[in-house]
Image (cartoon, grey):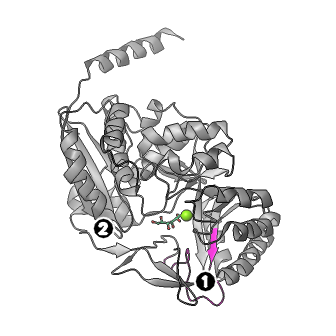
């Protein structure tokens, strides 16, 4: 290493020694620039502040209250550099561990502290997580249509935008509406204002239709394009095994959330029958939701992401465990995760060796304006940019123009009225 590098190192070391920061204040903002987002802003006596995403779709105010009423009072006066200690303090200190509300609130604090750390050290967060393991993060976009033809047209649009990987969902003949098919194509948003809308479901109709969709897509687009599909928790293990088997000729990148995953052991059945790669975990909130899946190599991709998976501090440990068992990451990145969570995911994705893919549903123009960010898309890849910290800001004045509006994800019933999984 030459002399200039050493000088730089000595300089950054002396900066590090001078840093002694204290948390002075923290605020929670709820805004609805097209959809609801909850954002935590932690301020310090050095003027540096950090942002964390605390959005839990359809249950936003519960996390906002958890932060304001229970966590923020415990943060004032603490050293924001102690990310591990603060995480343990909030996780162990609650006594009531885990659960989506608790873990989303902890994740928001953790994200904001990593953001502060990066800004104070004047470096992007990925440099604190191990640096850049790759030049960019491959993402997948969402193509959806009312039928196979319309879905294929949408796949073509994403391909033109440069995507190398595309998730395909289509309407099911005989069902008036289903998961993944939206009016607004590029900005698919499942939550709706008012009370939860109701959808109808038939497993048989679905299982007959999906292989036809992927047969048509492979015929039209050839073998190179990565294709993905989300079942959205609707099958039993043996039904999922049948679907996985019937999709093998179309070599999917992954089949997502084939079953509800409370019963991790259920994946053993799917695994015995199919070589279609399996992804799961967007609703998981700690390692205890995934440890059997990882250690028994029952899945190929883990969908846990920074905001619902306990923050960067927890997720990087989960990724380290997953790496040993050949499980790669595939962070959830739907529009209900704010640009703050998207940025945090990108810093994580670019740094870990066992990165697989990142979901990227583009946010609307209004959302991007409320959250100006340094990450950018090029040729199928996202890059977090080189701004210090997470590289995202929050325009409070603009956000005030979009007050919270109650909204819910749909619920789902079988054709005979039985309540089912959305
Ligand atoms: C995905 C997800 C979303 C979820 C949504 C719930 O794969 O992107 O399944 O569509 O339904 O994020 O809030
Ligand atoms: Mg999903």
Q: Nearer the viewer, residue 146 or 422?
A: 422
Q: Earlier in the sequence, mark 2 or mark 1?
A: 2
Instruction: State left or right for residue 388 relative to residue 247.
Output: left
- Residue 341 in the image: x percent, y percent? 41, 51
Q: Is residue 31 above or below residue 95?
A: below
Please tell me whether residue 175 belongs to the stretch shown in magenta: yes
Crowding near pointer 1: few (<14 within 10 Å), some, many (20+)? some
Judging depth in this view, the residue of 204 and 212 nearest the camera is 204
The residue lying furthest to the top in this view is 3
The picture quadrant where one finds residue 110 is top left
Q: Is residue 115 visible?
A: no
Name the disc covering residue 146, or none. 1
> Viewer-proximal residue, 97 or 68?
97
What is the chief secondary structure element of the magenta stretch? Answer: loop
SS under mark 2:
loop
**305 sits left or right of 25 in the view:** right
Residue 148 in the image: above or below residue 83 = below
Q: Which segment is the magenta one? A: 168-184
Image spot of residue 259 (x, y percent): 62, 65
Above or below 240: residue 265: above
Place of residue 198 in the rendered image (x, y in percent of width and height, measured from the top left): 46, 84
* Mark 1 residue element: loop
Circle 2 residue: 32
Queried on whether the Cβ of the residue with tag 1 lies below 8 angstroms from ligand 1, the answer reads: no
Q: Residue at x 27, y 63 (%)?
A: 61
């Amino acid at each position: 290493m030459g002399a200039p590098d050493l000088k730089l190192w000595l300089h950054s070391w002396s900066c590090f020694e001078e840093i002694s920061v204290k948390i002075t204040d923290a605020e929670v903002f709820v805004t609805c620039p097209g959809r609801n987002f909850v954002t935590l802003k932690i301020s310090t006596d050095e003027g540096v502040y950090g942002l964390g995403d605390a959005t839990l779709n359809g249950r936003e105010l519960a996390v906002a209250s958890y932060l304001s009423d229970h966590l923020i009072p415990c943060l004032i006066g603490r050293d924001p550099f102690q990310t591990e200690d603060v995480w343990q303090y909030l996780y162990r200190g609650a006594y009531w561990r885990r659960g989506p509300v608790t873990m989303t609130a902890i994740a928001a604090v953790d994200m904001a502290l990593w953001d502060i750390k990066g800004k104070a050290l004047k470096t992007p967060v990925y440099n604190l997580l191990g640096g850049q393991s790759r030049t960019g993060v491959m993402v997948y976009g969402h193509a959806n249509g009312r039928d196979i033809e319309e879905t294929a047209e949408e796949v073509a649009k994403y391909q033109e935008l440069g995507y190398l990987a595309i998730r395909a969902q289509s309407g099911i003949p005989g069902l008036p509406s289903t998961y993944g098919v939206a009016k607004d194509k590029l900005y698919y948003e499942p939550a709706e204002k008012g009370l939860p809308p109701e959808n109808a479901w038939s497993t048989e109709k679905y299982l007959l239709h999906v292989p036809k969709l992927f047969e048509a897509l492979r015929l039209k687009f050839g073998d190179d394009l990565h294709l993905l599909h989300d079942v959205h928790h609707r099958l039993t293990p043996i039904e999922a095994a049948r679907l996985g088997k019937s999709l093998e000729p179309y070599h999917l990148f992954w089949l997502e959330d084939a079953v509800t995953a409370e019963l991790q052991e259920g994946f053993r059945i799917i695994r015995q029958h199919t070589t279609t790669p399996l992804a799961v975990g967007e609703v998981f909130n700690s390692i205890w939701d995934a440890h059997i899946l990882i250690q028994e190599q029952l899945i190929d991709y883990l969908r846990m992401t920074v905001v619902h998976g306990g923050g960067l501090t927890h997720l990087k440990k989960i990724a380290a465990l997953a790496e040993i068992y050949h499980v790669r990451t595939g962070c959830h990145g739907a529009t209900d995760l704010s640009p703050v969570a998207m940025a945090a995911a990108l810093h994580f994705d670019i740094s870990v060796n066992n990165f697989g893919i990142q979901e990227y549903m583009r946010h609307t123009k209004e959302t991007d304006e409320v959250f100006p960010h340094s990450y950018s898309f090029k040729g199928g890849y996202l890059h977090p940019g080189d701004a210090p910290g997470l590289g995202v800001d929050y325009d409070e004045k603009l956000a005030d123009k979009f007050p919270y509006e109650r909204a819910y994800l749909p619920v789902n019933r079988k054709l005979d009225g039985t309540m089912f999984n959305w």
